[in-house]
Image (cartoon, grey):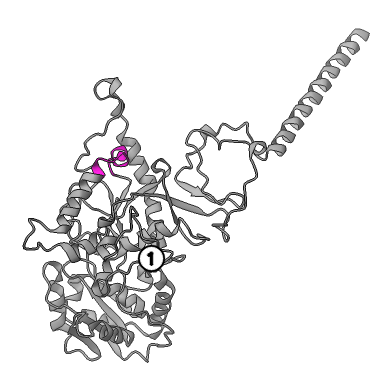
Amino acid sequence: MAERNAHFTGQKSLFCLFLVTAILFMLSWFFVWRSTGRPHFIDHSLLPNSKIFATIDNDNPEPRIQSDIGPSIGNAEDEVEAPPKKNLAECNPNKVFLKVFMYDLPPEFHFELLGWKAEGESVWPDIRKKVPDYPSGLNLQHSIEYWLTLDLLYSEFADSLSGHSAIRVHNASEADVVFVPFFSSISYNRYSRVKPHEKGSKNKLLQENLVKFLTTQEEWKRSGGRDHIIVAHHPNSLLDARMKLWPAMFILADFGRYPPNIANVDKDIIAPYKHVIKNFVNDLSDFDSRPTLLYFKGAIYRKDGGFVRQELFYLLKDEKNVHFSFGSAQRDGINKAAQGMHSSKFCLNIAGDTPSSNRLFDAIASHCVPVIISDDVELPYEDVLDYSEFCIFVRTSDALKGKFLINLIKSIGRDEWNRMWKRLKEVENFFEFQYPSKEGDAVQMIWQTVARKVPAIRMKVHKSKRFSHWNGSRERGPRSLPLPRNFW
């Protein structure tokens, strides 16, 4: 009996010793964790890659890039106190930025097209002193690349980037996307005509040189061009180069003049036009103070899908409180259109030569409820914005049925119109281009749309490399593979 008690007492002592040792071991790890501020025993190589975006800390206002394969380099005790720097994210210390590498293309591809002359070896104008003006009038509606380029340049010296979505980085390996600063729309508008002493237009020559430049760059070869952003907002811009640069992400007005294997909604982005009429500031109008029920002023006889305009003209021209007339930007046409939209309840946006039209964004700026008749239209950032809250969509086949359209418009009462009118005023900032750009405007909305495409781009780039190491001799290393026509 005594032997059994002694054996039991020995077991109990061993158990107590083991328990005390375990508790001390756990406490020691807890104090180590508390002292370092993070659990270093976690294998960060197993965590998801967080390189897609750069973040800004309170203590470090520079972009913090996390490695693909492990934790950030350096421990807390190794850090040296840095001199105070400007706070780039004063409103949001954990601000996430899209990282954009922008080629330093020669000025002939961008600001020189606006009449700016470079000094010395400078590639970019000093926009802190003066921003080169973009041509006014209808040229402005396709000026998207101008505003995006300005925004990237601004990100390099701004005291605060609060509200901004993208920053320029100078190391392509850190970038999420690569931006090509070619002002393709103004190149088409101003330089597409062949002069008497020239064999080809300046616009065509610039496109040829652009293709030669891009396809020889390591950045292009690394991804096959899939992570490159090229703006071709004017429907006739980049006509010669688009077939060769098709793997890139295009920023377009619509897909009207592109075959689906060159441009499509899966890989490309639709950006708004810059409206050409003035904003309706201090709009105190209401349902009763806008006498015109339905308004349209513009080109009536169009080709391709624009035939519906002339058909609707004959259906609506004699309707009461409907204004449907020919108009152009000449002879004060823009101001007259602004006055008409400001005094109308509904504004027609009808397909023309292409599915989209600047008229939609003029209507939004006028708080005139858009009536969209364009079956193939694609709209900016529709993945996050519900246009049915402030627009009316009508199928072309229905619009051409006798009294269908006018009866539909007349059936919309004061309360419903007021709701849509208020929503227009809430979303109008999403379609504003300005410098410096501001939170929630068109420039920032476009960058955010690009950011939402980045994971899909990265997945396609990674998939394209699956067999690249094993084609031919292993000593050759990775090489670029030809892209199939139906890759996207």
Image position, residue 393 (x, y; %): 28, 71
Instruction: Give the quarter of the image for residue 488.
Output: top left
In this picture, is 121 found above or below 432?
above
Q: Quadrant of the N terminus?
A: top right
Residue at 62 percent across and 46 percent down: it is 82
Q: Amino acid at mark 1?
A: Ala
Part of the protein shown in magenta: 214-225
Q: Is residue 467 left or right of residue 127?
A: left
In the image shown, does 30 or 113 lie closer to the viewer?
Answer: 113
In the image shown, does 339 or 58 lie closer to the viewer?
Answer: 58
In the image shown, does 459 or 196 lie closer to the viewer?
Answer: 196
Q: Main secondary structure of the magenta part?
A: helix
Image position, residue 345 (x, y; %): 32, 84
- Residue 222 covered by magenta stretch: yes
In this picture, is 22 found above or below 104?
above
- Residue 430 in sight from this viewpoint: yes
- Residue 259 in sight from this viewpoint: no
Outermost top residue? 3
Outermost right residue? 2
Image position, residue 344 (x, y; %): 31, 86
Residue at 33 percent across and 85 percent down: it is 342
- Residue 447 covered by magenta stretch: no
Q: Is residue 58 left or right of residue 297?
A: right
In this picture, is 240 found above or below 287?
above
Outermost front residue? 120
Instruction: Give the quarter of the image for residue 34.
Output: top right
Image position, residue 438 (x, y; %): 45, 66
Packing grade of label 1 (10 A; few <14, some 14-19, many >=20) is: many
In the image shown, does 246 or 23 lie closer to the viewer?
Answer: 246
* Label 1 element class: helix
Instruction: Give the quarter of the image for residue 129.
Output: bottom left
Question: Badge 1 is on which residue?
Answer: 442
